[in-house]
């Protein structure tokens, strides 16, 4: 369910794309980066869904609250995007950075520490690709 919450804006984007849909061009000119991003994104999702910590103990609610805030920021970013704001800061910080942060914080809350490594790699490549596409140096 935690993964599905993050997926909701992407499903809407696929079914009803916005008028100025610049994210369709958000892939790297370097195929290896696309492969790394895709592979570690899939591994992150699989580990999030399949690997459940069954040890006793309480989960710190701070991680769940922070994950909720990052998810809210992600949703708000999509609202801005659908309203025509396609600024690089929004695409990088709001749409590229928030999902990996959400997955990372959710992994901490679930005590799914194995998830943190592929999530970090996915996040770094996801952000790098977005920066390469939307920042002009």
Image: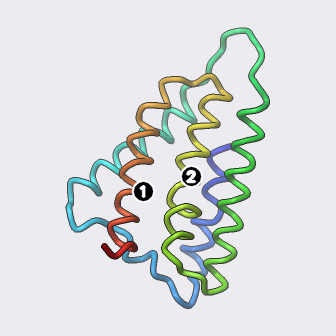
Q: Circle 1 sits in a helix, a strand or a loop, which is it?
A: helix
Image mark for residue 82: none
Q: Residue at x 66, y 14 (%)?
A: 54
Q: Residue furthest top?
A: 56
Q: Is residue 79 left or right of residue 48?
A: right
Quadrant, the C terminus: bottom left
Q: Residue furthest bottom?
A: 19
Image mark for residue 127: 1
Residue 82 appears in which quarter of the rendering?
A: bottom right
**Where in the figure is residue 74, as x and y percent of width and height?**
65, 60
Q: Residue at x 22, y 68 (%)?
A: 29
Q: As rendered, which of 26 and 50 lies closer to the eye? A: 26
**Where in the figure is residue 42, as x and y percent of width and height?**
42, 45
Q: Earlier in the sequence, mark 1 or mark 2?
A: 2
Real-space CA distance between mark 1 and mark 2, rounded to the nearest whole angstrom:
10 Å
Q: Is residue 58 left or right of residue 34?
A: right
Q: In the rendered picture of this protein, how many numbered marks are placed on residues? A: 2
Quadrant, the N terminus: top right
Q: Which residue is mark 2?
A: 99
Q: Is residue 105 left or right of residue 131?
A: right
Q: Is residue 106 above or below residue 22?
A: above
Q: Circle 2 sits in a helix, a strand or a loop, which is it?
A: helix
Q: Is residue 9 left or right of residue 58?
A: left
Residue 105 appears in which quarter of the rendering?
A: top right
Number of residues whose C-alpha sits closer than 10 Å to that of mark 2, classed few (under 14), some (14–19) or many (20 or more)? many
**Where in the figure is residue 96, as x and y percent of width and height?**
50, 60
Q: Nearer the viewer, mark 1 or mark 2?
A: 1
């Amino acid at each position: 369910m935690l993964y599905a919450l993050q997926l909701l804006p992407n499903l809407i984007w696929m079914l009803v794309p916005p008028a100025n849909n610049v994210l369709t061009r958000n892939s790297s000119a370097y195929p290896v980066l696309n492969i790394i991003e895709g592979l570690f994104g899939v591994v992150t999702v699989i580990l999030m869904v399949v690997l459940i910590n069954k040890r006793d103990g309480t989960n710190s609610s701070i991680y769940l609250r922070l994950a909720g805030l990052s998810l809210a920021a992600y949703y708000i970013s999509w609202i801005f995007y659908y309203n025509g704001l396609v600024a690089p800061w929004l695409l990088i910080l709001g749409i590229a950075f928030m999902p990996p942060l959400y997955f990372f914080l959710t992994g901490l809350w679930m005590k799914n520490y194995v998830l943190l490594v592929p999530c970090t790699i996915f996040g770094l490549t996801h952000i790098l690709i977005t920066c390469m596409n939307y920042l002009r140096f």
